[in-house]
């Protein structure tokens, strides 16, 4: 199991299926979007911060990869890993896991399968001027602490 923070947990309903019986793409994206807001709030970019400071966060790039089918009744968890934080942007990856068996095995581990991943690059903006702006220092610092250890080459 990953040590990345959990940013989403939910259930898949039958009405979310597409015409071939798999989770429709719009419902993957919705879940990844919800995970982004939880992840950003963890860094200090909360709804209150956005309102009070008239800031926003916009997606510059996003790339989804679908690894395994998700069916009605699936239990999903998303964990998020920060890959890079820059002055005005950050890059992170969501990994969606399908909990294949909600109870733990003999070793105490829950069976999970990677269902999908989404890599995003987001930009911090001044919502009034509609221009990019620097992350606050505390957000930048929290992000820097979440970055994986860099191994020397």
Image: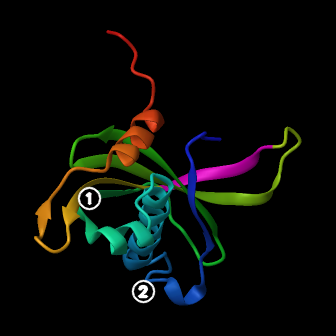
**Residue that badge 2 annotates:** 19
- Indicate the secondary structure of the residue bearing disc 1: strand
Q: Is residue 58 magenta?
A: no
Q: Measured from the top left, where is residue 21 in percent x and y?
A: 50, 80
Q: Measured from the top left, where is residue 84 in percent x and y?
A: 31, 38
Tell me the magenta residue range. Answer: 109-115
Nearer the observer: mark 1 or 2; the answer is 1
Q: Measured from the top left, where is residue 109 in percent x and y?
A: 77, 44
- Asked if 144 appears above or below 136 in the picture, the reply is above
**Residue that badge 1 annotates:** 62
Query: In what quadrant of the picture does the C terminus appear?
Result: top left
Query: In what quadrant of the picture does the N terminus appear?
Result: top right
- Indicate the secondary structure of the residue bearing disc 2: loop
Residue toward you, 37 or 13: 37
Q: Tag on residue 18?
A: none
Mark 2, other Cα within 10 Å: few <14 / some 14–19 / many ≥20? few
């Amino acid at each position: 199991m990953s040590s990345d923070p959990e940013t989403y947990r939910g259930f898949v309903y039958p009405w979310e299926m597409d015409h071939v019986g798999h989770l429709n793409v719009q419902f993957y994206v919705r879940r990844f979007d919800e995970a982004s807001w939880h992840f950003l709030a963890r860094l200090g970019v909360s709804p209150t911060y956005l309102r009070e400071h008239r800031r926003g966060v916009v997606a510059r790039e996003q790339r989804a990869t679908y690894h395994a089918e998700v069916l009605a009744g699936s239990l999903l968890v998303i964990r998020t890993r920060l890959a890079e934080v820059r002055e005005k942007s950050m890059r992170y990856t969501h990994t969606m896991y399908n909990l294949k068996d909600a109870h733990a095995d003999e070793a105490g581990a829950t069976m999970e399968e990677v269902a999908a991943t989404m890599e995003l690059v987001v930009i911090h903006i001044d919502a009034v001027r509609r221009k990019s702006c620097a992350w606050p220092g505390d957000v930048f610092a929290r992000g820097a602490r979440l970055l994986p250890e860099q191994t020397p080459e």
